[in-house]
Image (cartoon, helix red, strand yellow):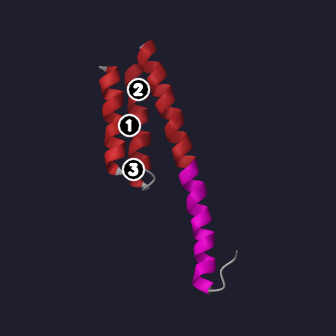
């Protein structure tokens, strides 16, 4: 169902753009978290991969894709596994 009001038509377009961006950020976040969890068990270049995971988590938080507490929880879980 398409909206009739001009501002709502614009919102439909921006919502779709936001949805696609959020999906990409979340997908990238999941990818890096899996990579970090695998690296922690291998212990090769653990520090670098954990650092990258932190960076991706912070980016997702800054863009509003995940909540601040969720980001902190993910970082704490990675740190706990790494140590």
Q: Which residue is mark 2?
A: 48
Q: Residues within 10 Å of mark 3 (few under 14, many from 20)?
A: some
Q: Which residue is mark 1?
A: 54
Please say whether residue 38 is visible from this viewpoint: yes
The residue positioned 66% from the left and 85% from the top of the image is: 4
- Where, quadrant-wise, is the C terminus in this rendering? top left
Mark number displayed over residue 61: 3
| SS of the residue under disc 1 | helix
Q: Is residue 13 left or right of residue 48?
A: right
Q: Position of residue 8 (x, y in %)?
A: 59, 80
| SS of the residue under disc 2 | helix
Q: Residue furthest front?
A: 1
Comparing labels 2 and 1, the label whose residue is closer to the camera: 1
Mark number displayed over residue 8: none
For the stretch drawn in magenta, what is the main secondary structure?
helix
| SS of the residue under disc 3 | helix
The residue positioned 55% from the left and 61% from the top of the image is: 18
Q: Verify CB contact (< 8 Å) between mark 3 and mark 1.
A: no
Q: Residue furthest bottom?
A: 5
Magenta span of residues: 6-23
Taking depth in this image into account, of 78 and 55 the one nearest to the observer is 78
Q: Is residue 4 above or below residue 66?
A: below
Q: Residues within 10 Å of mark 1 (few under 14, many from 20)?
A: many
Upstream in the sequence, badge 3 or badge 2?
2
Q: Is residue 49 left or right of residue 17?
A: left
The residue positioned 62% from the left and 86% from the top of the image is: 5
Q: Name the quadrant containing residue 12.
A: bottom right
- C-alpha gap between disc 3 and disc 2: 20 Å
The residue positioned 42% from the left and 50% from the top of the image is: 66
- Does the segment drawn in magenta span residue 18? yes
């Amino acid at each position: 169902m398409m909206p009739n009001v001009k501002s709502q038509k614009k919102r439909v377009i921006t919502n779709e753009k936001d949805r696609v961006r959020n999906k990409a950020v979340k997908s990238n976040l999941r990818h890096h978290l899996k990579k970090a969890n695998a690296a922690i068990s291998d212990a090769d270049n653990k520090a670098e991969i954990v650092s990258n995971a932190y960076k991706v988590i912070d980016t997702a938080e800054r863009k509003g894709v995940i909540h601040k507490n969720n980001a902190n929880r993910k970082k704490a879980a990675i740190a706990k596994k790494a140590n």
